[in-house]
């Protein structure tokens, strides 16, 4: 397993590593960590935490976070405050070129700031089409029109790539057409595949064709396509995503501790089912007993991600040192724009 990574992505309880967490990170079934606000105090502390995570073993560990912007930004003090992506959609209606330019700059800034402290990946951007139905998506979506999302998200992804970070499109095949929140419920979307293809799937299909690095699967049931939630569906992940859309990148499950993933009280069953369906990496957060259950019950050898896959989401470089990023002209320009945007929002 020297060239593979474990499929399980876990969380940490605080701002420093406990002895138990050091042992968990050394387990061959674990491939990375997702960080939350509770893990953050300052940039210096975060950089040290990332260094300690990587010191737990010789082979790489992926470090990731949800740093979308708007109401989903885990690190705020000492980082640039990022707007909700809807802000760029509103700008796009009047100034499409400027909106795409600034989305690209913001994608670069977000990625560069995270890379500067040692984080590989932000789970962004959201590719959901806002239908005015989903409160959990809402202004996290760039726009209501698929073609606008393609241009804006494509620009954001380009900026991330220029910084050295892979992009993760979520929540496949689209969370914008259901009202229930999969964190606390099991959303069901009765539409046919043809209906989904004519709307929600359009941004995913276009950006996959442009080389999207990773996809996060939604915990939504589309009974006209498959009775299982997408994260556990071979039809969605193997047939539609891999074969029909020809996606060759990394597939992440959403958090398997969410209610939408509650196919079994046994967390090892959830992980095994997501892996069998086609997920490369699976997230299990805020459920330490469940993580230990998974490590005890599943074979590490059977829960590995090949090197070509995991290298596709590993940060390409960490060249934006904490001391020098503020001297970077692109960072200064992008930050100046975002600060002016925030001031206009406050005035309104």
Image (cartoon, grey):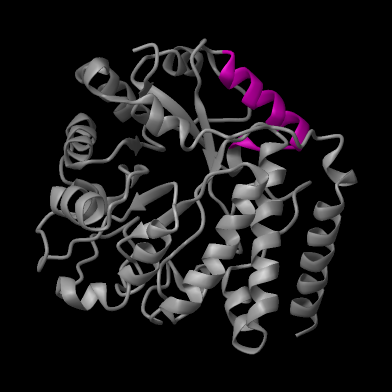
Q: Can you tell which quarter of the image residue 114 is in?
A: top right
Relative to 327, does residue 61 appear above or below in the rendering?
above
Considering depth in this image, is 160 or 221 the residue closer to the camera? 160
Furthest residue toward bottom: 94
Q: How many marks?
A: 0
Locate residue 308, reporting x and y percent.
Answer: 39, 30
Relative to 25, does residue 242 appear above or below in the rendering?
below
At horizontal 63% and vertical 29% (from top left) the residue drawn is 15
Is residue 52 a member of the stretch shown in magenta? Answer: yes
Is residue 130 a member of the stretch shown in magenta? Answer: no
Q: Quick one: quadrant of the C terminus? A: bottom right
Considering depth in this image, is 250 or 220 the residue closer to the camera? 250
Q: Quick one: quadrant of the N terminus? A: top left
Locate residue 139, reporting x and y percent.
Answer: 52, 73
Q: With 320 as the anchor, is 233 left or right in this view?
A: left
Q: Can you tell which quarter of the image residue 169 is in?
A: bottom left
Residue 305 visible in image: yes
């Amino acid at each position: 397993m020297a060239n593979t990574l474990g499929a399980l992505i876990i969380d940490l309880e605080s701002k420093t590593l406990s002895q138990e967490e050091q042992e968990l990170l050394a387990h061959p079934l674990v491939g990375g960590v997702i960080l939350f606000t509770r893990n953050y105090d300052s940039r210096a502390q975060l950089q040290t935490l990332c260094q300690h995570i990587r010191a737990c073993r010789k082979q790489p560990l992926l470090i990731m976070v949800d740093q979308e912007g708007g109401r989903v930004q885990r690190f705020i003090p000492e980082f640039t405050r990022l707007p909700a992506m809807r802000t760029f959609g509103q700008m796009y209606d009047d100034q499409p070129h400027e909106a795409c330019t600034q989305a690209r700059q913001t994608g670069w800034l977000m990625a560069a700031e995270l890379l500067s402290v040692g984080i590989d990946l932000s789970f962004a951007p959201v590719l959901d089409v806002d239908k005015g139905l989903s409160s959990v998506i809402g202004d996290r979506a760039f726009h209501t029109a698929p073609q606008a999302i393609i241009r804006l998200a494509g620009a954001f992804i380009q900026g991330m790539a220029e910084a050295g970070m892979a992009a993760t499109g979520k929540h496949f095949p689209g969370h914008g057409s259901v009202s229930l929140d999969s964190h606390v419920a099991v959303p069901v979307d009765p539409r046919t595949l043809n209906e989904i293809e004519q709307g929600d799937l359009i941004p995913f299909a276009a950006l996959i064709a442009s080389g999207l690095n990773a996809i996060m699967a939604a915990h939504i049931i589309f009974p006209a396509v498959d009775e299982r939630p997408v994260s556990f569906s071979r039809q969605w992940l193997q047939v539609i995503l891999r074969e029909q859309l020809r996606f060759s990148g990394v597939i992440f499950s959403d958090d398997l501790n969410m209610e939408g993933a509650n196919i079994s009280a046994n967390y090892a069953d959830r992980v095994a089912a997501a892996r069998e369906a086609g997920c490369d990496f699976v997230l299990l957060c805020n459920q330490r007993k469940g993580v230990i259950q998974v490590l005890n019950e599943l074979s590490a050898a059977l829960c590995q991600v090949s090197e070509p896959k995991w290298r596709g989401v590993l940060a390409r470089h960490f060249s934006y040192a904490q001391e020098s990023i503020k001297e970077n002209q692109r960072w200064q320009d992008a930050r100046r724009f975002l600060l002016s945007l925030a001031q206009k929002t406050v005035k309104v």
